[in-house]
Image (cartoon, rainbow, N blue to C red):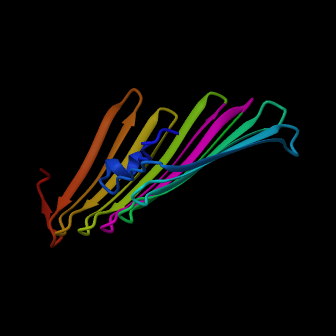
Amino acid sequence: MPNTARIIFSSAILCGLMTLQAGATDAVRLRALRKNANGGVSRTVVTAAKGPEGGTGVKERSVSTNGQGSATRTVKSDYKGPDGGTASRTSTGSASSTGAAHQGAISATGPNGGTLNRQGSTSVSNGAVSHQGSLSGTGPNGATVTSSGGATNGTATRSSQVTGAKGDSYSGTTSVTKGSGVKHTGTCKNASGEVIPCK
């Protein structure tokens, strides 16, 4: 691992919650490979690092097969910045002769109290693809955002709600249907709950 390796949790950075930089002067990597009870093999790699300013990160990756053409991959990560911000991620993917699936989750807390949580899942079965996902976040000033949606069989829908620190809010839904186009509805309100123009 380079002496000035950076551990940067991308989703937390995009939301302005945390930047964790670990000049990894202390790092260790462990590997294990073994046969498993399902007739396949399992491989695990664990990496841990600590930066000069106190930032830490641990990442575990594992892959398992069953000897019959199926495989599962899991990734778990936990990071902590020197400023107290934290982030974690879990991801599991599987593949077999009939399809594939993936599930993942991300959570982060900034040093000033902002939070981010995101979950998602995607599956492919007999040529059909389905996806579901959601997100929620809270800013250090009290602003909030939630969003959820999914896509399957040529139709995608997402609903979002945003509330500002002063109480103004937006709520809307966007849908896309193959052959029909895009449809969007949205409403904005002030802190008193009165409908106002969306800008």
Q: Quadrant of residue 144?
A: bottom left
Residue name at image x 36 percent, y 30 percent? 180
Residue name at image x 33 percent, y 65 percent? 111
In-front residue for pair 80/143? 80
Q: Quadrant of residue 163?
A: bottom left
Q: Position of residue 56 (x, y in %)?
A: 48, 57
* Magenta segment, prevailing SS (helix, strand or loop): strand
In-front residue for pair 189/76? 76
Q: Position of residue 197 (x, y in %)?
A: 11, 54
Q: Is residue 122 magenta?
A: yes
Residue name at image x 39 percent, y 50 percent? 21
> Going by the picture, which residue comes out furthest to the bottom?
192
Q: Quadrant of residue 53?
A: bottom left
Give the left or right position of residue 69, taking residue 160 as reference. right
Q: Is residue 66 magenta?
A: no
Q: Position of residue 113 (x, y in %)?
A: 33, 68
The span shown in magenta is 96-125
In-front residue for pair 167/54? 54
Give the left or right position of residue 154, taking residue 116 as reference. right
